[in-house]
Amino acid sequence: MSIEIRSIAEPELDQYIGSVRTAFGDEANEGEQDRVRRVLGLARARAAFDTKGRIVGTTGSYDFSLAAPGGVDVACAGLTRVTVATSHRRRGILRSLMADHFDEAAGQGAALSILWASEVAIYGRFGYGQASENMAVSYDGRLADIAAPVQPDELELIDPAEAHTTLPDLRERHRIARPGLFHRTPVWWEVRSFPDHEWQRTGASANRTVLASRNGEPVGYAIYRQKPKWNDLDLPDGEVRVGEVVGIDDRALHTLWWYLSNIDLFPNVTAYLQPVDSMVPWLARNPRAIRRLVNDGIHLRVLDAAAALTARRYDTPGELVFRVVDDQRDDVAGTYRLVVADDGTARCERHDGEPTATLSAQALGALYLGGCRPDPLVTCGWLQADGRTVDAMRRMFTWPVAPFCDEGF
């Protein structure tokens, strides 16, 4: 069967959304057409069409600037809405869609592609490596007993109008220091971040926003919902559902977490998406009360090795000649020389010398944001290098701030 892969047109939008929702077993939510049109864009909503014009597979690709180690941004494609109709599996459609995504993203200058994987095992064969983790935390604030800040910032609840003008700049100041966070454009904030639809609440309140300030200047914010509950003894047992906690430094973050842990009538705190190096367990006088669940975060695929490795910063100077094995992208496969200066800046370019390390595209993606040590990649065969080279790679590539992505897409 002949399959055509192309961008969708406006009359095909409902079919595109319907195909995605059928694959994930749910229904379109309020505002989804607007999100596709304005945030994704019809040109970047791609679909596989059969000879009758029916959509039998989909992808989408956001245009991101992604924070890399060292407070720098890298051009990145955010792969999303990847589906193949059950009736058309095992026909090479997914492979064609992925190749189309790589060509489109690389052609527009993206050095990286990232995704949240619904089925993780699928994407390693396309060169994606697990580049970050995330952590869900839950606790009873009465048992955890979060220590009060020595110098707390000032706190106030703000209305949506003030949130719209204050939050984007604060998140941007916070974002650039955390590898894995992408820049939210004004349209992203307007269409995806700020709307508070009923379907998003799942029985809880509308979003509340608390702002932390210091000497009259905003330094952080938290977005949360409240879900009232009373136990069998008619005592308050409500829940605080934490959406985002953003701070420009640890003092601001500590102040916000203390606030979230001490809301009257709502002792139970749940935060589903937090970095694995979150300070919360270390603030608790009873850390055993903090329940933690770690899962994989974003998966990353390098589309331009020289550009990507030149862009990021490194913790230790050094030199490495390595070969990338990539059966998906001939323009990525090959040998490179990476030279890191004393200030952490680097230059990576093609090289004709003998490599001291050979790694898969999947391994390169896992290493890129600095959260994965090279050692386990050796044990599973994705990286071949002697012990001295592995030690050098560990010092060069790892980063003191854990990579993290704070939002699914």
Image (cartoon, grey):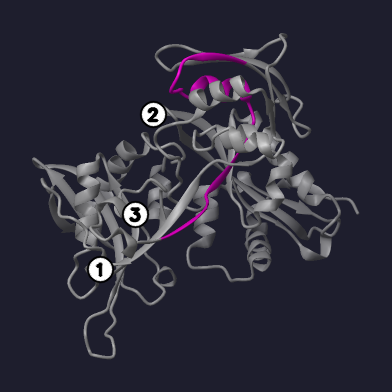
Would you say the residues marked 1 and 2 are in contact, meaning their CB atoms lie under 8 Å apart? no
**Relative image position of residue 262 (x, y in whole percent):** 19, 65
Residue 330 at x, y = what percent?
76, 26
Residue visible at 91% across and 54% down in the picture: 1
> In the drawing, does residue 33 fall left or right of residue 162?
right
Q: Which residue is mark 2?
A: 71
* Pick the front one: 34 or 223: 223
Q: Is residue 202 visible?
A: yes
Query: Seen in the image, is 255 located left or right of residue 35?
Result: left
Q: Earlier in the sequence, mark 3 or mark 1?
A: 1
**Residues rendered magenta in the picture:** 292-320
- Label 2 crowding class (10 Å Cα cut-off): few <14, some 14-19, many 20+? some
Secondary structure of the residue carrying numbered label 3: strand
Q: CA distance from mark 2 to mark 3?
A: 20 Å
The type of residue carrying mark 2 is Gly
Q: In the displayed structure, would residue 197 be above or below residue 359? A: below
Q: Is residue 295 magenta?
A: yes
Which of the marked residues, 1 or 2, is nearer the chain's N terminus? Answer: 2
* Mark seen at residue 143: 1
Q: Which mark is residue 244?
A: 3
Label 1's element? helix
> CA gap, disc 1 to disc 2?
37 Å
